[in-house]
Amino acid sequence: EQGYRSRAAYKLKEINKSYRIIGPGSYVLDLGCAPGGWSQVAVQLSGNQGKVIGIDMSFVEDIPNAKIIQGNIDEPSIVDEIMEHFGRKADSVICDLSPQVSGNWSIDHATQISLNYSALKIMEQVLNKKGNALFKIFDGEYSSEFSEFVKKKFIKTKLTKPKASRKPSSELYCICMGFY
């Protein structure tokens, strides 16, 4: 009804209301952006002075006022593409990456955490000092290891599960404020 491409848009809106990951004028990088719900919200939150880039391996229909890149975040050239479009470092990196789910929970969980480590490599190169990040995590045996690793890079981190997430979902969100 409200024109968002996914229910995930409400998760980002809820998290941002509490933690202000994205503010007016923010330059936002959305990793794993398909189908585009988070990028839509990022465009609204960052306003006319902001810029949004969404990256995904899947095709994503254009989003007004966002640049969509169809590509793999493990490609070495992706950082150059991001920096070229922004012309400076990003204020926020939001990551909703998810693997093609196989149905084998331990494999899906490990793959999803691995994607987050790939996202971290990009984030370390493109995020402003004091910038913010948000990572979706499939809760499981490697989630606390990832969360501890991220803690060393930010002033404040917090794990949360927004009300917009389904109760049985294993999704957690790692909120990261103040990149060192």
Image (spheres, grey):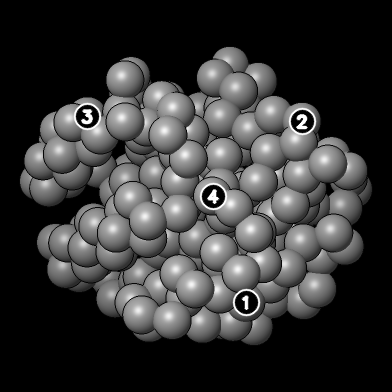
Q: Name the image quarter holding residue 154.
A: top left
Which residue lies under the disc numbered 3?
151
Sequence order check: which comes first, mark 4 or mark 3?
4
Q: CA distance from mark 4 to mark 1?
A: 17 Å
Can I make out residue 31 in this image?
Answer: yes
Instruction: Label 2: state its secondary structure.
Output: loop
Q: Position of residue 161 (x, y in %)?
A: 42, 29
Which amino acid type is marked by label 1? Ile
The tag on residue 69 is 1
The tag on residue 24 is 2
Sequence order check: which comes first, mark 4 or mark 1?
1
The tag on residue 89 is 4
Disc 4 or disc 3, which is closer to the eye? 4
In screen coordinates, is 88 left or right of 26? left
In screen coordinates, is 65 left or right of 72? right
Q: CA distance from mark 4 to mark 3?
A: 21 Å
Q: CA distance from mark 4 to mark 2?
A: 16 Å
Q: Position of residue 177 (x, y in %)?
A: 42, 25
